[in-house]
Image: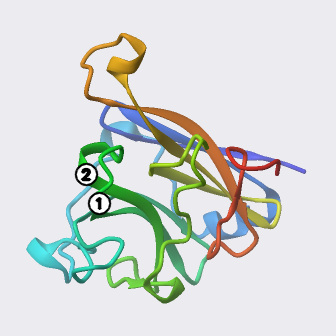
């Protein structure tokens, strides 16, 4: 099996994706920039607030306070965007008073999005004592071998001060992984049980 590596640089960060032969057919239709000096982006006006493409949900929803940290997969027909959604929480051990969970939205054009899973998150905090008991953050999803793998930040309520670090109020994150065969319900992860 041949593999192709595609590197996308944005600012000082970057990401690397490994592509299998089956996935190459999709990318062959998308031109790859080889001259990094011409690899600039232009903002595209979206249909949401302040010309964004996606915004917070209705009051009371898991993403009613704020959204962020998107990761997007495109299969040639549908864009799938996993995102962090937050809602206010009364639990004093939830960082900053906002419970973060991971949701999924889909789009045919990358601009107009519909939240899937009947408006519920696809990954929620685990049971007490787990690495992701209090919140989830920063998902990164990769399609591999007929399944989706999601790496995400897991927050158990520990803060830097608990470890003698500064700034003391910052939540400590660990990295966990979860899998799904269709990307909609991602429920098994290395922070909870073996995959």
Disc 2 vs disc 1: Cβ atoms closer than 8 Å?
Answer: yes
First reached walking from the N terminus: tag 2 or tag 1:
1
In-front residue for pair 144/9 = 144
Q: From what the image shows, is residue 75 above or below residue 38?
A: below
Q: Is residue 168 left or right of residue 69?
A: left
In the image, farthest residue toward the top: 164
Q: Which residue is mark 1?
A: 89
Q: Is residue 63 left or right of residue 148?
A: left
Q: How is the image coloured?
A: rainbow
Q: Using the rendered image of the protein, determine whether residue 69 is visible from the camera's viewpoint.
A: no
Q: Which residue is mark 2?
A: 97
Q: Position of residue 46 (x, y in %)?
A: 21, 77
Query: Residue 39, labelled with which disc?
Result: none
Who's the residue at 22% across and 70% down the image?
A: 44
Who's the residue at 59% across and 55% down the image?
A: 126
Q: Is residue 188 left or right of residue 110?
A: right
């Amino acid at each position: 099996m041949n593999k192709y590596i595609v590197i996308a640089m944005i600012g000082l960060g970057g990401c690397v994706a490994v592509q299998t032969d089956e996935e190459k057919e999709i990318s062959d239709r998308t031109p790859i920039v080889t001259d990094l000096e011409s690899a600039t982006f232009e903002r595209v006006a979206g249909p949401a607030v302040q010309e964004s493409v996606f915004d917070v949900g209705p009051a009371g929803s898991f993403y009613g306070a704020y959204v962020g940290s998107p990761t997007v997969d495109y299969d040639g027909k549908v864009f799938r965007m996993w995102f962090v959604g937050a809602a206010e929480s009364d639990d004093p051990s939830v960082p900053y008073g906002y419970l973060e969970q991971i949701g999924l939205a889909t789009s045919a054009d990358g601009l107009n999005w519909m939240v899937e899973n009947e408006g519920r998150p696809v990954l929620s905090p685990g049971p007490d004592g787990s690495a992701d008991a209090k919140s989830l953050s920063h998902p990164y999803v990769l399609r591999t071998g007929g399944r989706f793998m999601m790496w995400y930040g897991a927050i158990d309520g520990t803060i830097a001060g608990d470890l003698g670090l500064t700034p003391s109020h910052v939540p400590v994150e660990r990295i966990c992984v979860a899998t799904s065969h269709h990307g909609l319900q991602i429920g098994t992860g290395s922070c909870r049980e073996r995959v």
